Structure formats: C-alpha cells, structure tokens
Amino acid sequence: MESFIGLEIHIHLATETKLFCGCRARFGDEPNTNVCPVCLGYPGTLPVANQQALFLGYVVARALNCELSPRTVFERKNYFYPDLPKNYQISQYEHPIGRNGFIMVPLPGGEVRKVRIHDAHLEEDAGKMIHAGDMSLIDYNRAGYPLMEIVTEPDLKTGEEAEAFLIHFQRVIRYLKVSDGNMEEGSMRCDANVSVNFPGKGLGTKVEIKNLNSSRFVKKALNFEIQRQIGVLKQGGTIRQETRLWNENRDLTEVMRTKEMANDYRYFPEPDMPPFEPDPVFLEKVEKAQTELPDRKKARFVNDYRISEESAEFLIASRYVADYFEEVVQIGIEPALVASWLSGDVQKLLNRHGLTLDTSPMSARRLGQLLRLLNEERIHGKIAKKLAELVFEEDRDPEIIMREKGLEQIVDFDVLRGFIKNVADEYPAVIHSIKNGDERQRGFLIGKIMEKSQGRAHPQKLQKLFDDFLSEVTA
Amino acid sequence: MKKNWKVRPEDKDYQAFLLETNKKLGAFLSFSFNEAMTGDGEFQGIPLAVKDNIAVKNQPLTCASKLLENLVSPYDATVVSRLKDKGAVVIGKTNLDEFGMGSSNQDSALAETFNPWDPLVVPGGSSGGSAAAVAAGMVPLAIGTDTGGSVRQPAMFTGVFGFKPTYGVVSRYGLTAYASSLEVPGFIARSVEWIKLALELTAGADPHDQTTTSDVLAEVRPIKKIGYLKVDDGLSPVMAAAYREHIEAWKDLGYVLMPVDIPALEYAVPAYYTIATAEASANLARFTGIRYGVRPDYAQNPQELVKKARTAGFGREVKRRILLGTYVLRSGFQDQYYHRAQKIRTIIRGDFNRVFEKVDILLMPVYPTQAFPRGESGLSHLQQKLADKFTVGANLTGIPAISIPAGVRDGLPLGFQLLAPALHDRDLIQMAQLWESKTSIPAPPNYPPRWED
Ligand SMILES: [Zn+2]
C-alpha cells in the first residue's frame, strides 16, 4: 500500500497588532480586553490590512520558494460559527500571496525530500469558545489575529515524515522570525489530509484529520489513520471522504463530519479592501528579510568550520544559537572548542538554571572572553568550568571575576618553586621514596602542591619544575 | 457663506417643534437633545439628522431592525466625526427601510414615516426619514446612505436635493454595510450650499476605509453639453411630461441638450440585485445577538441562539434578500449569477464612459413615478425593485449623482437627477446651485422653510 500525506499548517504571524484593526495581538490577557468595534464585528466597521502582516506573509512565501502574487486579494469565506465575529472569515482564495513553492526537508534516514507547497495565504483567526456548565463563553482576544496558512502537496508518506517536516518547518519560520511557531500555545497548528491506495494507483480518497496539536500527535494520528485506511481497503471496503478528529485520550481518529455535511463557503472577493500590489521597494525588503535557512547553514558549518554533523545539528536547531556560535568564532576562538562548550558546559548550566541561551548571562562576548583566557593559558580547564558557573551566578564578565577572585593561573617560576619547596619540607620521606624510584607517590605530591596553590598552579609548568627540583635534590 | 440661523439644537422651542413634528411624520427614530457640541467651525451648533444605519457614538444604531433595537454605537462614523469636528451636533437618528433594504420606508421594523407633502404617500427610501426631516424643515441637512438610489429617490419624493458622491470620496467607515461595493454616504438638504459644505468637509481618504481614494475631487469644468437619457416608456404620464419640460428648461438656460442611449441599463436592475444581495448575505451574517443586539432569553446551544435571534429579528424583505444573496453565491452557480452580474457591471461602466466622451453631464429620471401611495395601493416589492432602474447605474459605476427638485404636480414634488464622471462631484454641485438660483424650490404646504435666507 502507498500512503500520501498533505499538511495544512497555520502559523500566527508575530505582528504587533491584529490583521485588520489596531488591537494588540497578544496571548493570555484577560478575556475580551484586546478587542475593538472592528474585531468584534460591529456594524459599520471596516477592515484595514496590516502592512506588517502582508510583509511577513510575503517573507514566508518567498522562503518557501513560492511564486509571489503581484496582486493578492482578500476574500470572504462564509460560514456561521459563534467565535467568528462577522460569520465570515477574511481569507484568500483565488489570489493567495504565494503558490507553487517547495521546501527541502531532511527526513529520518537521511533522505532530503522536496515537499511541494500548493499555496501560502493570509487570513484572520477566530475567537475561542469555552463551555462552562450550561453556559458558552467566548473570548475574542484571538479574533482577527493574523494567521498564515501553508498548504503542502501530498508529498509525505508516514507519520514520521510528517513529524520531521513540522520540526524543520518550525525551524524555518523561527529563522525567519515571522512566528514563534509554538504548537503547545497554538501559534502553530496543523491539519492533515491522508489517503492510501494500492501501489501505482495514485492518490486514494482523501480524509482530513483535524486537531493535531503537537508534532508527536501528528505522527501518531497519521500512522493510526494510514493503518485504519489500509485495513478498510484490505477488507475490500472503500474509504469515505470525510473529516476526522484526533482523539488524544483514546489514541484514535473519529468522524467529525462527512462530505455531505461540508460547508459551501461561497467565497467572493472582499469588497472592503482593494487588492494588494507589492511595489519593487516592498519586494526588495522581502528579499532582504530572507535568511540562510537551517539546512544550508548546517552544510556550511560542517564545511567551513570543520565541525561534526552532530555538532552542526545541535547549533542550527535555533537561529539564535547558530548566530551566537558564529559570533564567538569571530572573536577568534577555535570553532570546535566553541561548539563543544556550547553543547557541553554551557548547555548543562542553562539546564541547571532553567534558562535558554538568549536569556542567560553568558553572552557570546563573555563566552569568547572565557575561552580566550583558556587559550592564552591564563586559566586552565578546571578553572574555566568554575568561571563559567560564576558567570551564571554573578552575571559579570569572566575576566573580572577571575581577577577579583584571584583565579588566574600561577606561572611565575619562583612562586611555583616556593610551593614545591614547602611541600618537600613537609614530606621529606615521600621525596626520598620518589628519589628511590617509587613513581606512585609522585601524583600524591603534585596534588599537595596544587592544593597549596589553591588549584591555580599551571599544571605543565609545575610538572616541569617538580622534575627539576627532584633532579637537584638527587644531585 | 452667510446664513440667518433661526434655531439652535439647545433651543427648547426647537426641541418642542421637533417632537411635535415627529409625532406627525415619524422621521426620527430617536433624538439626542443632550448631545454636546464637540467641534468648532463651519457647522457651529448646526443640528444634523443621521440615518439610523450610520454610527454616532453613544446614540442608537438600530438600522430600523428589531434585531438591533437595543444597540448603542460605541464609535462615530467618519462622515459623522468630520462634521462634528466642524461643530455639527447630531440631533437624532432617522428612520429607514430595515438595513436600507427598500424604497418606501414601509420596510422599517420600528416606525412609520410619512411624506410631509401628503401623509397618504410614502416618503421614499431607504433614507426616507432623513428626507422627510429635511423637507419638513426639522434640520437643514441630513446624512443618508445611497446603495441603489436610497438618497436620491426619497429626496425627489419629498422635493429636496439629494446627493450621492463618487464612490470612495467620502468614507464608508461607520455605515452599516448592506452592499459594500455599491453604497456611499449621501447628503440631503433643501439648499445646495449645505450639501456643498458637507461634501467639502467630509471628502478625502480615511485610514479606516481602504476603499477611499487618495485622488482629490476635480475642479469645476465649464459645462456646455448635457446628455439626456432617451426614455421611450416606463415613466408615468405625469413624469414623462415633466421630463420633457425639464429638458426644455435646461435648454432655456442656454445648454446644449443631446439625447443619449445607455443600452446596458436594461440589465442594471438584475445585476444590481445580484451583487447587492450577494454582499448583503455576508454583511448581515454578523447579526446574531451574541455580541450585541437583541438576544433570545434561552437557547440549547449557540447555533440555536443564532437561529432564534435571526428568525425573530429580521423582517421579511431582509430575509428575502439574504436568501437571494446566498443563492447567487453558491459554488458552481457563481458564473451564472454573481460573475455574470459583475460582467454586466463592467459593460454598464463602459456605456457611461462612452456617454461622457460626448457630453459633460448626464440628465436622467430618478424614478418612474412620483411618491407612490402607502400600503396595498402602492408598488409591490418587485415593482419597487424594477423602478430602481434609473438610480442603480450611478451605484454600479461609482459615479456621482444629484437629484434636484423640479416643481410640483398634483400636490407632489417632481425631480430629476444629474450625473457626472467619477470625481466630478463639484460640477453637479455647481449645476444644482445654478438650478436652485433660477427656479423656486417649493416647500410642503404645512412646513415652511426654516433654514434658508
Ligand atoms: Zn480590534
């Protein structure tokens, strides 16, 4: 059996205000506080298209390699729903911002698949209905929030592929800084359509799956649905064209509505807004907002910085981390060292403090400073780790902390000789046995000398001076 | 401009006059005598009547519908705020056919409005309340909306001037939408000076309405040639005779009068009602009683609530138009109805453009008859729609038009309309003022003019 999956992804665009009015586009406020006559659908109000949303829309469509519309048109999609204030959604239909695009997606197993984009269009979000006892309440804060819908062609085959697509897609939109793409908070939502058929027979009957609120659900729901359809076909049955809902409690899909119950949306062009025709200046800005996308960045990191695939994958997962990495490398630190610190010690400290890199006291400049101190042998590895901890605790530059706390390595021969002499005086018997060839005691004495220096003695220099000392004593 | 203002909104005698007159005419649905003056300028202290489908902050916005009987507007329409800024005071809200759907004011769900000339005939519609208020001297100026003739026809029925600006010149923000691509705010007055002033003060791009144009109104041109629409039949005998006389009158004023044809006008009414109802079916979907308006006491679920509210709240004509609009927009049928109507609209636009290549101004009837009788002996809903033939052209093409009073016959006013190319609104104002200066504008017998020199 062959299976075909297409995705419809909605992302909230990161605009200051809603798509058609001046209300703040913000989550989690007191219900019905970010509302006005326009987004509540009061009689006489008119929509005014948010230029920032149009811009971000074009940025996304361009990044997905779409043909950009020279004249994009809003249309009314008519259906009654209590949380939809006007009972039509202003969306796009005949002339979306972008169409016929594609995105290269790394799939599990190493294949990079070209997934075609049918279209990318702008529309407004609805409010949120809450049922409380025998009442229904509606919060319109979300009504009019700018949404971008991206519709793919059915180029994915399994739940795992769909999950990989979503993770990659999420990275892309975060790289573009157009949306935080957070599925848990609903700023990225996903519906899917699935069909199954006998090999070589092409697409089967399409079933739409809704309510896929995390990439994990997407995988589970799609794999369940593919197995369900295969089961039906193998028993000689036929698939009904319908919309199903993923039930996360029962781990299965359930019929939501059949084709006969489908709405006729009666699309027609929005008479309240003229079509938007981007001018060359606008399109140039769209071009400038394009950024190196994660897959490209990863290849460049491996190639230019000679770091492992694994390290590169870790770094490019977030644009912030990738940019941070390059900033530290710019300071003149060995890329592999930066990468290992970022994925190792810094990550451990972030986890311990419950922070992310962009909110942590360890700025790129500070990490650069710390690693430079290490490179210049002004501190050694153990002190560097300790210093990193102190940067997190004190939110100050590592060099300042090092000076204040006297953590700088001791390289002065006379000072080091003084430590050696002191310890030798305390343990004459041990010196004697080492002289007689008992090398096992050597480590013990070095440890004691290190202790005397409060861990600051330069280890190699200390070894060297200790050897000199021993030979002197013997002579 | 110098006017000898005889009354002011805060004047108690004036308020008493309004209440008294309104008992007879039902022109206003509500008064706001405590409305404070908030601006300063040309309209200092001038009372303004506003059709009750236009938003005025803290005043009712019923649209003459039971569904919105309790709605108070939280904001001002742009056309209102721009006049308020110049000192105008909105004295009250006037009656209309529910949501602007009708041409007699008999389709108001809230009140009856009578024609000041004769209580047995309709005042026209849908801006019938605004026209009656002006004709009776209750206010010097009223704002209406013109979707398919809703300013011009009642102005003609009541013997005053009614002006429809070029689409996009005066903002629609705050006009309860019936047919968004067709309608505009319009002005009704007994003296053209009021209309001129209102147009100059309200015209101009509005950040709240993206369909307003940044193009400015054209300067007045020298007018020489007037084309008049050849009308072979369809006019009442009285109207046909008056039309011929009216054409002669313009000749006597020294203009060259040329007959013109607009063949596509034959299809204007079906195209108009297809587009208007299609847009209305979406525009009126927002009225559910959930966020505002009259809500049923109880419902099993939100869907039932919406159904109950709309069933009880909308009148028959409104329901008929919503159904028609829903029908013409069905998928698979749009080519046959909605897209076809848009094609006709393009053809009509072409016809008008060709006419304006030959003449400066176009003269046409407003309506086939004078104000028709109330009730059964008047026109049916279908006859009323067919009679919109002469007015809907300006709405389908977006061009400006003004209806001008042209005498009285059988105790009722007569009137015709002048049309100009888009943005040539000032030509029409100038022509109407010229007409005003050459003829006497009669007043209804019991309502002497109050606001003019
Ligand atoms: Zn808002």
Image: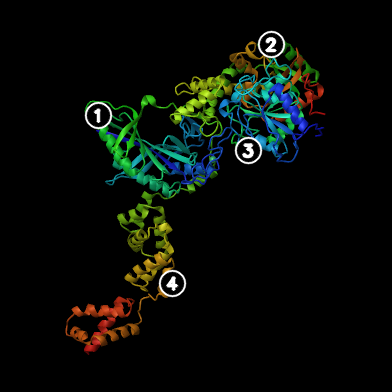
Residue located 30% across and 76% down the image? A459
In front here: B66 or B88? B66
Residue located 34% across and 29% down the image? A242
Q: Position of residue A173 (x, y in %)?
A: 42, 46
Q: Are there few (<14), some (14-19), or many (20+) residues within 10 Å of tag 1?
A: few
Would you say B393 lies left or right of B407 here? left
Q: CA distance from mark 4 to mark 3?
A: 58 Å
User: To which chain does the residue with label 3 belong?
Assistant: B
Q: CA distance from mark 1 to mark 2?
A: 71 Å
Quarter of the image where ligand 1 sits: top right
Q: Position of residue A220 (x, y in %)?
A: 29, 40
Q: Which mark is residue A400?
A: 4
Relative height, residue A425 to residue B130 (above, below): below
Q: Is the N terminus of chain B in the top left, top right, bottom left or bottom right quadrant?
A: top right
Colouring of the image: rainbow
> Which of the two discs, 1 and 4, labels the residue nearer the N terminus?
1
In front here: B257 or A456? A456
User: To which chain does the residue with label 2 belong?
Assistant: B
Q: Which mark is residue B206?
A: 3
Q: CA distance from mark 1 to mark 3?
A: 59 Å
Tell me, yes or no, whether dots 1 and 3 are on the same chain.
no
SS state under label 1: helix
Q: CA distance from mark 4 to mark 2?
A: 99 Å
SS state under label 2: loop
Q: CA distance from mark 1 to mark 4?
A: 70 Å
Q: Is the C terminus of chain B in the top left, top right, bottom left or bottom right quadrant?
A: top right
Q: Toward which corner of the image does residue A240 lie, by quadrant?
A: top left
Residue matched to label 2 = B236
